[in-house]
């Protein structure tokens, strides 16, 4: 384990499927290709062998999209308890190699806040991951979801805002013509990015970061394009007087980004220049992306030893209390 030079490697956007929850996925959410699906369902020898071969010491596990976000309140809460308890068993059996992010029943915000507290305080989870729009239509910045942010801030754990397939209205208006030839357009190719960048922007605009100043948000995929666009967003929003002093400052103060599925030197350098190396956390996006490609990239990123150590493990240790 570890990299060739002995560096500890922690990866924090690493997915699995709980068989009972994944069986409830419907429509476009069902279409995980069989080899990926097999790897999502494995939390044992094969996953560990792949981590070992790539030098990954610790995966912080999260359910795959859309996790609990498409279930109604009652079903989501019932599944949340089962899924989080089972993830806890996996972590407890091998806590050197696995830690966990909670799945939250966001359709019932009060229950989601309580489940987050149970998972962090009683099960030792390091935060929670939410996937796309609740019920396929609702962004998390809506006021009714604020109890979730309030509890995350009170518990001092981050919320990881992860993509899911865009809302059906967006699919029809923006992507329909190209889905058949390019199914990845809906997911990691573009649809995920637009929807999750929008979710991040909306969190800043909503005022929830002012209400809970300690709140920390994580975005994957090197920030879903936002580091590249911070100056432009800032400039455009500041043309009208608003309650937001600076989008860019709010984003850089509260957001962390991970390298999941975006092993690009140019995107990484842009992110470091906008946000600083303290805000960037190594991740792969296993099993959608290859572990070894991630660690091989980290060995040759154009940054010095200290920044590499921060990205590989130091920032995750601080952010998640590992
Ligand atoms: C991901 O979690 O990154 C992911 C999915 C589904 C398809 C592609 C993908 O959840 O990268
Ligand atoms: Zn992912």
Image (cartoon, grey):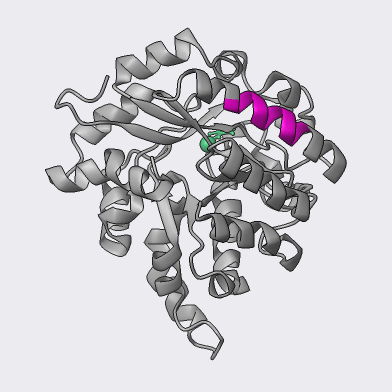
Residue depicted at x 26% and y 61%: 273
Nearer-the-camera pick, 165 or 305: 305
Q: Quadrant of the N terminus?
A: top left
The answer, for residue 303, to whether it is visible in the render is: no
Task: Check residue 83 for magenta coloring.
Answer: yes
Q: Is residue 169 above or below residue 27?
A: below
Q: Quadrant of residue 260?
A: top left
Report the residue at 58% width, 65% height from top.
203
Depicted 253 relative to depicted 90: above or below:
below
Does residue 238 appear to the left or right of 184 in the view shown? left
Residue 2 is situated, as x and y percent measured from the top left of the image, at 25, 24
Residue sitting at x 71%, y 49%: 114
Q: What x and y, as percent, mark residue 292? A: 32, 22
Is residue 189 something one can see in this rendering? yes
- Residue name at image x 29 percent, y 22 percent: 55
> Where in the figure is residue 123, as x and y percent of width and height?
58, 35
Q: Mostly what secondary structure, the magenta segment?
A: helix
* Above-or-below relation of 60 to 17: below
Farthest residue toward the front? Answer: 122
Q: Is residue 139 magenta?
A: no
Would residue 85 be found to the left or right of residue 228 on screen? right
Q: Is residue 178 left or right of residue 13?
A: right
Frontmost residue, 279 versus 296: 279
Residue occupying the far top of the picture: 45
Relative horizontal placement of residue 164, taking residue 6 as reference (left or right)? right
The magenta segment is 79-88
* Residue 22 picture location, percent across and down: 71, 25
Q: Could you tell me which quadrant the C terminus lies in?
A: top left
């Amino acid at each position: 384990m570890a990299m060739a030079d002995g560096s500890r490697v922690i990866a924090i956007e690493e997915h699995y499927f709980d068989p009972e929850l994944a069986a409830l996925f419907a429509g476009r959410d069902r279409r995980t290709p069989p080899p990926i699906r097999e790897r999502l369902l494995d939390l044992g020898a094969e996953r560990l062998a792949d981590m070992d071969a790539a030098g990954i010491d610790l995966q912080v596990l999260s359910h795959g999209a859309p996790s609990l976000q498409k279930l109604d309140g009652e079903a989501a809460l019932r599944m949340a308890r089962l899924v989080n308890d089972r993830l806890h068993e996996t972590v407890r059996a091998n806590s050197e190699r696995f830690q966990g992010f909670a799945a939250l029943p966001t359709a019932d915000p009060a229950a989601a806040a309580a489940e987050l507290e149970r998972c962090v305080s009683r099960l030792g989870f390091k935060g929670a991951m939410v996937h796309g729009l609740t019920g396929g239509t609702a962004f998390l910045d809506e006021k009714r979801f604020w109890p979730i942010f309030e509890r995350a801030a009170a518990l001092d754990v981050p919320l990881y805002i992860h993509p899911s397939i865009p809302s059906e209205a967006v699919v029809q208006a923006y992507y329909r013509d190209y889905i058949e030839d390019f199914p990845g357009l809906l997911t990691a190719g573009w649809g995920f990015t637009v929807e999750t960048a929008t979710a991040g922007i909306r969190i800043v605009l909503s005022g929830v970061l002012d209400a809970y100043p300690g709140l920390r948000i994580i975005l994957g995929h090197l920030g879903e394009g936002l580091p590249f666009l911070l100056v432009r967003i800032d400039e455009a929003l500041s043309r009208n007087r608003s309650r937001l002093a600076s989008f860019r400052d709010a984003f850089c103060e509260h957001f962390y980004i991970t390298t999941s599925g975006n092993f690009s030197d140019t995107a990484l350098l842009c992110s470091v220049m906008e946000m600083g190396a303290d805000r960037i956390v190594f991740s792969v996006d296993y099993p959608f992306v290859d572990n070894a490609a991630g660690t091989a990239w980290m060995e040759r990123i154009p940054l010095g030893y200290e920044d590499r150590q921060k990205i590989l493990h130091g920032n995750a240790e601080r952010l998640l209390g590992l």
